[in-house]
Image (cartoon, rainbow, N blue to C red):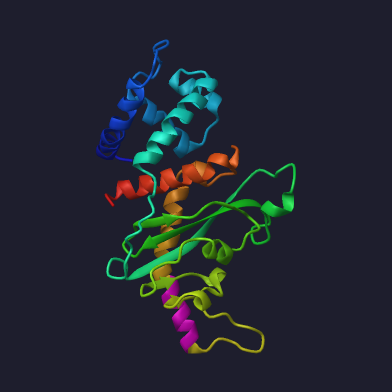
Amino acid sequence: MRLETFDKLVQKVRPVFEKLEASKLRHGRRSHLPTLEDKLLCVLVYYRTYISHVFLGYLFNLHNANICRLLRKMEPLLAKKISIKKDRTLTPDKVLRILADVSEQPTQRPSKKQKKSYSGKKKRHTIKTEIVIREDGRILSVSKSHKGRVHDFKIRKGEKPLPKESLKLADSGYQGWQKLQSNVMIPYKKSRKRPLTKEQKDHNRKLASIRMKVEHKIREIKVFKIMAEVYRNFQKKYNLRFNIISGLINFKYAF
């Protein structure tokens, strides 16, 4: 993140931060991170590197318990100002093409009900979240997060339908979406008895070249190591953090 973008982020979050500070009934000891800039930097470093709370506390001269308190305080503020808000005014004239895909991240093996989080595709325990983007790269929506066993299409069915007239592009994990909505374009799948024709192969190639934009957007999300490495935290806040990071990417491009 560039310095100018960070300054704009501070300005955006400052009103809700000052309101929270003013609502305190009493003030305790002075924090080692007295300014909003310091607090935001600490959160962003944590998202970007996903180092342990102990090491992060060493870098910012804080106890690891204070790191937990800082995250608990700052993440709701970021979510208010930065996270992806559901746009209820999406219309075909605003969105001509919509790209959808699912991001999958490895998690620690749960102690109970392991089958629910086991992904047959990744051969490990994962957590899934769908993102929907516009053709220019703006993230329009982020789905709820699901266990790795849940199919991509099932995640899509659980979300709000997209505009009917907009062209919706997805990968082969969304087989069946075209039966629920019109203007859905997915790749052709070959079988033993029915190999793909040249026209179908050309269609798949063109679709993949367009869909590459949503793959690149997922890569941008996974630049933040907290969304790429094995997720070590409780999954209760996973979707909140995914939303915040998606919002940061939109904010970076001034969407």
* The quarter of the displayed image where residue 95 is located: bottom left
Q: Residue, x 31% and y 67% (percent of image)?
A: 91
Residue 65 horizontal/vertical position (percent): 54, 21
Q: Residue, x 46% and y 43% (percent of image)?
A: 224
**Image position of 63 (left or right of 39):** right
Q: How many marks?
A: 0
Give yes or no for residue 98 being in the magenta stretch: no
Does 26 sit above or below residue 42? above
Furthest toward the top, the residue is 29
Residue 183 horizontal/vertical position (percent): 42, 78
Residue 161 can be seen in this image: yes
Q: Nearer the viewer, residue 139 or 158?
A: 158
Q: Residue, x 45% and y 66% (percent of image)?
A: 161
Q: Nearer the viewer, residue 225 or 184?
A: 184
Residue 254 horizontal/vertical position (percent): 27, 49
Does 11 sit above or below residue 142? above
Residue 18 horizontal/vertical position (percent): 30, 25
- Secondary structure, magenta segment, majority class: helix
Does 139 sit above or below residue 47? below
**Image position of 184 (left or right of 10):** right
Residue 44 can be seen in this image: no
- What segment carries the magenta color? 199-208
Quadrant occupied by the N terminus = top left
